[in-house]
Image (cartoon, rainbow, N blue to C red):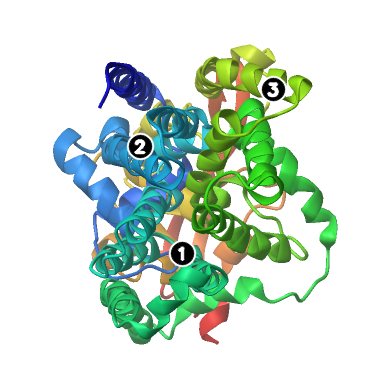
Amino acid sequence: MGGADAGIVRNTVLAILALVGLRLVAAAFTPITFDEAYYWMWSNNLAGGYYDHPPMVAYVIRAGTMIAGNTELGVRLVSILLALPMSYAVYRSAAILFGGARVAANSAILLNVTMMASVGTLIVTPDAPLLVASSFVLFFLAKVLETGRGVWWLAVGAAVGAALLSKYTAMFFGLAILIWLAVVPKLRSWFLSPWPYLGGLVALALFSPVILWNADHQWVSFAKQLGRARIEDFRPVFIAELIPTQIAFATPLVFILGAMGLHALTWHRAGALASRVLIETMFWTIVAYFVWHSLHARVEANWFAPVYPPFVVAAAAAANLVQWKPRQRRLVDFCLRWAAPTGVVMFAALIVQANTGWLSGYRRDATVRSVGVGWRDLAAEIEAVRMRSGATCVLAQDYGTTGWLAFYLPRGTCVAQQSQRIRWVNMPEPDPKLLAGKLLYVDELRSDGHPVLNDLFATVTQIAQLQRKRGPLVVETYGIDLLEGAKGDVLDRSPPPEAR
């Protein structure tokens, strides 16, 4: 490695360490989202699968809380630190596929300054470990291409298996790999080798706990997630949301570079055929599915996580390998120079806004309901009401409120979701003695109350109205009902739609 390359590597490492450090600081003081609270509850009861997703997000959270405790930082610690191996995998992928330390360094830094990576590893969802696993799928496929050694297919299988343990979207990697091998003539001989099939067995073995869990639970998780691919209500209006949300999640300058890179791979033939086709199949196979999905339902921006490793490699290729016309060259140079500062400013602004609301003048924004600002104070008020009333357990209507209550109320407090019990099938049932006493019911204040509770309890009395606030903004007002005289089982054990 020459002196110039060594300097590029050193600067890249320092930049990524600084970005990871910034996320760790943000993680320590940003309240958890309702999804994170929900997944944290999973992490306290590890299993082979869950109603919503495979279990990797629970393993990641559990590893972090074992180190830093049941705190916001503990929930997020390992997810954020996984950006380090993720960056290595993307760096090496780009170096193998397109050569040169500069392309590799640009790829790693561009990925880390996207909101998908910065916010997506800080806010722990199944997409966080999926993003990391996707980076290694690309890296190990690049090693197959570089070395021609079949043993690397076992590593590919392990990475795909880890991705499948993160989210079912990873099944599209299999299709992408098949297309890659079929399109590139020199790779077709792999169809006659046992190694790719052995790699498939490795992936299947790693994924088998999820299969077994589903088999024991009427296949509810598979039915819930795979059933989304069916178009039952044609509403293509959601397609219009795809590009704007990805411009935001990629950050505008990285998005421009990535789009130019994908164009260059196809029309400028930047790089070798096998490298170009690998990037494009890893990107377009999953994108094509989400376009299909958007014909009938909204596609959340973070669902695109697995396409970001090939996307940023394409962006770096556009910046370094293509002979652009002067006007295009100026655009590429501008985007490359300002992509990192723009990404850092966008990340910092989002964290400040989510925690304070300053940037919108304390008005509502997209973060206000999902980030648990104000929940620590609200939970203290709910606990005071519980103690005064003598309630033995706290019930909630939705999984998000249940998660927040469990995380922010004193440890050991009985908390349960009254409905959708399939979500909690891996967790111990609340003590029947606690459910037999007085109960608190916490839900957003509703003008019609909760008629269903009148059928379950002899007495339903609203004893408090409490507010969750971000600064002067009232985010939500909760009605606190005291439930007495249970007429039967207070938990709704109806099977989910997928199991009926």
Please identify the quadrant where the N terminus is shown.
top left
Q: CA distance from mark 3 to mark 1?
A: 35 Å
Mark sitting earlier along the chain (1/2) = 2
Q: Residue at x 66, y 24 (%)?
A: 332
Estimate the x, y position of residue 393 in percent, counting from the top left: 33, 53
Disc 1 marks which amino acid? Ala
Q: CA distance from mark 2 to mark 3?
A: 26 Å
Q: Which residue is mark 1?
A: 170
Viewer-proximal residue, 248 or 26? 248
Disc 2 marks which amino acid? Ser
Tell me, yes or no, whether the two marked residues, 1 and 2, touch with CB atoms within 8 Å.
no
Question: Is 400 located above or below residue 366 in the figure?
Answer: below
Q: Is residue 170 visible?
A: yes
Mark sitting earlier along the chain (2/3) = 2
Viewer-proximal residue, 96 or 262? 96
Q: CA distance from mark 1 to mark 2?
A: 19 Å
Question: Is 388 located above or below residue 441 in the figure?
Answer: above
Task: Indicate which disc residue 87 carries.
Answer: 2
Disc 3 marks which amino acid? Arg
Estimate the x, y position of residue 39 in percent, counting from the top left: 37, 52
Estimate the x, y position of residue 158 in percent, counting from the top left: 28, 65
**Labels 1, 2: front one:** 2
Q: Which residue is mark 3?
A: 329
